[in-house]
Image (tube, rainbow, N blue to C red):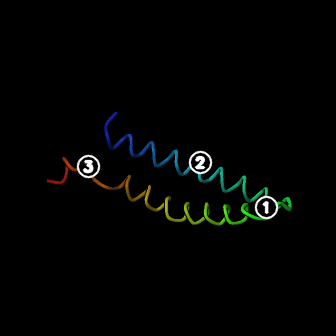
Amino acid sequence: MSLRQFHIFFIAMALGLTGFLGVWSARMAAAGLNGPYAALAVSSLIGLAAGIPYFFWFLRKRPADARA
């Protein structure tokens, strides 16, 4: 596994975990358990809003050895 493939895997897993955390915390906040759950849902949404475009940018980015 190359370093590029590892980064793609790591970014995808981090985005997946952020998505699941956001859904879980939004469900907890909707169930009436306010407090940190609403803040966690919002921060997960912000993380996904920044992470998804970064992931697709990284996929389109050419490897360093093919830039010549």
Mark nearest the camera among 1 and 3 is 1
Residue drawn 57% across and 48% down? 16
The percent position of residue 68, horizontal first and vertical second, equals 13, 53
Looking at the rendered structure, the kind of residue marked 1 is Ala
Residue 32: quadrant of the picture: bottom right
Mark 2 crowdedness (10 Å alpha carbons): few <14, some 14-19, many ≥20: few
**Marks 2/3: CA distance?**
26 Å
Q: Provide the residue designation for mark 1.
A: 29
The label number, if any, that marks residue 46 in the structure image: none
Could you tell me which secondary element the residue under label 2 belongs to?
helix
Q: Of the residues under marks 1 and 2, which one precedes in the sequence?
A: 2
Q: Which residue occupies the extreme left position in the image?
A: 68
Q: Do callouts 1 and 3 mark residues in contact (Cβ within 8 Å)? A: no
**Marks 1/3: CA distance?**
42 Å
Q: Is residue 10 left or right of residue 41?
A: left
Q: Of the residues under marks 1 and 3, which one precedes in the sequence?
A: 1
Q: Of the residues under marks 2 and 3, which one precedes in the sequence?
A: 2
8 to 33, vertically: above or below: above
**Marks 1/2: CA distance?**
18 Å
Residue drawn 50% across and 64% down? 50
Looking at the rendered structure, the kind of residue marked 2 is Leu
**Quadrant position of the N terminus in the picture:** top left
Q: Provide the residue designation for mark 2.
A: 17
The percent position of residue 27, horizontal first and vertical second, equals 78, 56
